[in-house]
Amino acid sequence: MHTRSNRAAVLFLKIAGTLSLIIGGVGIILPLLPTTPFLLLAAACYARSSERWYRWLLYNRWFGTYLRNWYEGKGIPMKAKALSILFLILTMGYCAVVVVPFFIGKVALILIAVCVSVHILSFPTLEPDAEF
């Protein structure tokens, strides 16, 4: 009985990790969807369910360097910060100007964009020579 529940927990963690990885991957493209928390959740799920999957994630060509730099406290590359803020401003600006008809909604979107930008800028900046 214990083995069956253990297998179920491992399966649940792998599914949760994979869903988190997908959401984190989408977050790279969509500026309002946070990437880091979902990648960290995926890493935590994989670490508890499959050493092989965890290792794959840490050394994956798209997510690995990002996660390792985060774990080591090195920060976020300036290019990633700049692109994140640029896409944030473009999408939130478009929504505030074109999509949302209410003034309070426009103000809320602009405030969210400012707060998220400040939050992104608050992380340490990864020095170019520390990336590899």
Image (cartoon, rainbow, N blue to C red):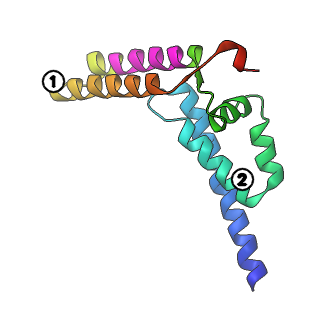
User: Does residue 85 belong to the magenta stretch?
Assistant: yes
Depth check: 27 or 131 in front?
Answer: 131
The location of residue 5, given as percent across then percent down, is 71, 77
Range of residues picked out in magenta: 81-93
The location of residue 20, given as percent across then percent down, is 60, 46
Which residue lies at the image location 44% right of the left edge and 26% below the top edge? 122
Secondary structure under badge 2? helix
Q: Are marks 2 and 1 in contact (CB under 8 Å)?
A: no
The amino acid type found where label 1 is placed reads: Phe
Mark 2 and mark 1: span between their CA atoms?
44 Å
Q: Residue 10: name its quadrant.
A: bottom right
Per the picture, the main secondary structure of the magenta-coloured stretch is: helix
The amino acid type found where label 2 is placed reads: Tyr
Sequence-first disc among 2 and 1: 2
- Which residue has dot 1 on it? 103
Query: Farthest residue toward the left?
Result: 103
Secondary structure under badge 1? helix
Depth check: 54 or 4 in front?
Answer: 54
Any mark on residue 56, and which? none
Which residue lies at the image location 78% right of the left edge and 34% below the top edge? 60
Tell me: residue 107, above or below residue 24: above
Q: Residues within 10 Å of mark 2 (few under 14, many from 20)?
A: many
- Horizontally, residue 76 falls left or right of residue 116, namely right
The location of residue 58, given as percent across then percent down, is 75, 39
Which residue lies at the image location 63% right of the left edge and 16% below the top edge? 127
Q: Which quarter of the rendering shows the C terminus? A: top right
